[in-house]
Amino acid sequence: MQRLPGLLATVALTVSAAAFANSHKEAPMIVPASAPTSAQQAKMGECNKKAAGKTGDAREAFLKTCLAADAPTSPQDKTKK
């Protein structure tokens, strides 16, 4: 009779741990691994490759100018000029 409370506690912990572990398996993936890259992501990748070897402020300045170069303009930008 003295082992009953210990056995019940062990069973309760095992069941609750299993329920907790299974509750996280149903979470949906936000972005699939095979998602196509956007134009901006492709441009960031290209600029990042070109910036190889640069560090610190020089890298930041290069990336800023590289990403700003040939920036796509929206139709709204063209009408404001």
Image (cartoon, rainbow, N blue to C red):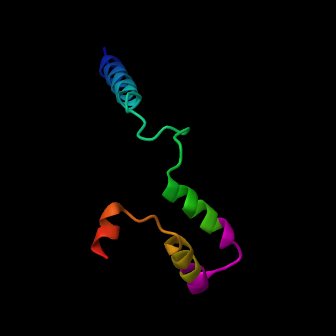
Query: Residue drawn 57% across and 56% down?
Result: 42
The image shows residue 26, relative to residue 61, as above or below, that is above
Quarter location, residue 53: bottom right
Q: Residue at x 55, y 63 (%)?
A: 44
Q: Quadrant of residue 34?
A: top right
Does residue 69 show up magenta in the picture? no
**Quadrant hosting residue 75:** bottom left
Q: Residue 18 versus residue 69: which sits nearer the camera? A: 69
- Give the camera-side residue of 7 and 63: 63
Provide the residue span drawn in magenta: 49-60
The reply to whether the magenta stretch includes residue 56 is yes
Q: Residue at x 49, y 59 (%)?
A: 40
Q: Say which quadrant the N terminus sits in.
A: top left
**Tag count:** 0
Report the front residue among 41 and 22: 41
Q: Position of residue 19 (x, y in %)?
A: 35, 25
> Does residue 34 lie above or below 42 as drawn?
above
